[in-house]
Amino acid sequence: MRLIAANWKMNKGIHEAQEYIRKLLSLLKTTEDREILICPPFTALCELKNLLKETPIKLGAQNCYYKKSGAFTGEISPPMLKELNCEYIIVGHSERRHIFGEDDELINKKLIACLEEGLRPILCVGERLEERSAGMTFKVIETQLRLALSGIEDYTDSIDIAYEPVWAIGTGVPATPEDAVSVHRFIKDLIREINPSLKGDTRILYGGSVKPSNAPEFMKFEEIEGLLVGGASLEPESFAQIVYSF
Ligand code: PGA
């Protein structure tokens, strides 16, 4: 089933989050044939846990640390997120990599920690503009994937992957659907090579300047098995349009 995920980033306090969810629920139509996920800031998770109970909307976190507990000031662990009914965790988002300096080794540890807790990671990968211009896109994606999945090759069915070209995030300039499809195919082939016994449960999502106006173009392609939406997920109306873009 395709997954449409909202990444609110550092936006919305509890009250705004409540209003948003009420509105979004009123806009939902059929939900059996698609998965809908909201990843709010940590501070809204507890409230959303209650609001989303018995609704078709799933809850996820935008980040985690890889230890279960301990002296790690300011960090949140996968067991804590599980207690809040999170089913998904975004791992290795480009803002985590480039603003907060997360490297592939840390991302690998976070993936392992999520899997141990039975949480489904959405692993983000993507090239920077200079890497794309230098013809390095596939090489960059391959390196990020091999390092992130190191030691957990057999568990790739329990992970979704978001292809988010860094230059497309928050810029209003998405990849063309054709370019995204070629990277998605490359990722699918690579994870099949990494894990030959893959059942095929890994979904490859596209993210980067997805809007209601361009979402249908992406969703026309079966290789695009979902969307990770930032800016356009902040209004329930536009997120709902994206949810029903296919
Ligand atoms: P954007 O962000 O939709 O605002 O480009 C996507 C993301 O960062 O996941």
Image (tube, rainbow, N blue to C red):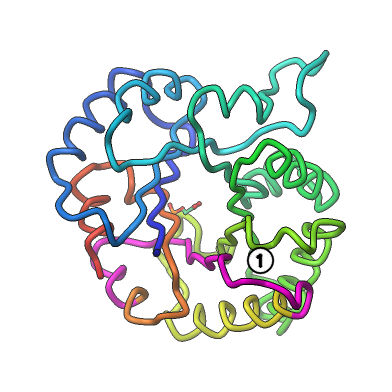
Identify the residue shown where x is 21% and y is 26%: 19
Q: Is residue 167 left or right of residue 13?
A: right
Q: Secondary structure at mark 1?
A: loop
The one nearer the camera, 223 or 164, is 223
Identify the residue shown where x is 32% and y is 51%: 232
On the image, which quarter does residue 73 sit in? top right
Task: List x then y, in percent, for residue 151.
Answer: 87, 57
On the image, which quarter does residue 83 sit in? top right
Task: List x then y, in percent, for residue 57.
Answer: 33, 41
Instruction: Count the labels in the image.
Output: 1
- The crowding category of the residue bearing disc 1, from other C-alpha atoms within 10 Å (few below 14, some 14 to 19, many at least 20), is some
Q: Is residue 222 left or right of residue 216?
A: right
Identify the residue shown where x is 79% and y is 18%: 72
Q: From the image, give the main secondary structure of the stretch colored magenta.
A: loop
The one nearer the camera, 71 or 201, is 201
Task: List x then y, in percent, for residue 143.
Answer: 80, 69
Q: Is residue 246 left or right of residue 191?
A: left
Range of the magenta residues?
193-217
Identify the residue shown where x is 19% and y is 38%: 25
As for residue 208 lying within the magenta part, the answer is yes
Task: List x then y, in percent, for residue 183.
Answer: 59, 79
**Taking 106 as reference, is 69 above or below it?**
above
The one nearer the camera, 200 or 218, is 200
Q: Which residue is mark 1?
A: 128
Query: Which of the image's four quarters has the C terminus?
Result: bottom left
Q: Amino acid at mark 1?
A: Arg
On the image, which quarter does residue 227 sit in? bottom left
As for residue 151 lying within the magenta part, the answer is no
Query: Which of the image's four quarters has the N terminus?
Result: bottom left
